[in-house]
Image (spheres, rainbow, N blue to C red):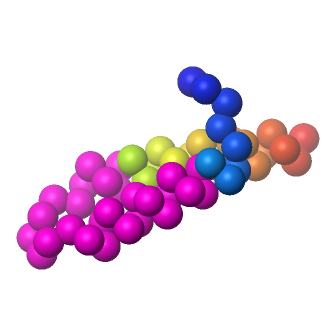
């Protein structure tokens, strides 16, 4: 996995939230939520590494 920065992860998370918000009613959000969950986990890793 390429090294992520907090800024890159924040931008990716914001893009995913915008896509989720733009989905039509009844559309499956699961793939986007799973990707968002992954982004959050990666951000947590980056932040914990920065604190070490």
Q: Position of residue 16 (x, y in %)?
A: 40, 58
Left or right: residue 18 versus residue 47 is left
Q: Decide whether residue 31 is among the magenta residues.
A: yes
Q: Position of residue 47 (x, y in %)?
A: 76, 49
Q: Nearer the viewer, residue 24 or 39?
A: 24
> Is any part of residue 32 visible from this angle?
yes
Quarter of the image where the N terminus is located: top right
Q: Nearer the viewer, residue 44 or 1?
A: 1
Magenta residues (range): 9-34
Residue drawn at point x = 26 percent, y = 71 percent: 22
Q: Decide whether residue 15 is among the magenta residues.
A: yes
Left or right: residue 24 versus residue 12 is left
Q: Is residue 52 above or below residue 22?
A: above
Q: Position of residue 52 (x, y in %)?
A: 90, 41
Left or right: residue 6 versus residue 48 is left
Residue drawn at point x = 60 percent, y = 57 percent: 10
- Going by the picture, which residue comes out furthest to the top? 1
Q: Quadrant of residue 46?
A: top right
Residue drawn at point x = 61 percent, y = 26 percent: 2
- Going by the picture, which residue comes out furthest to the left? 26
């Amino acid at each position: 996995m390429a090294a992520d920065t907090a800024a890159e992860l924040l931008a990716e998370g914001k893009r995913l939230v915008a896509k989720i918000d733009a989905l039509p009613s009844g559309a499956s959000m699961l793939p986007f939520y799973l990707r968002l969950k992954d982004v959050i986990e990666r951000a947590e890793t980056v932040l914990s590494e920065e604190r070490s």
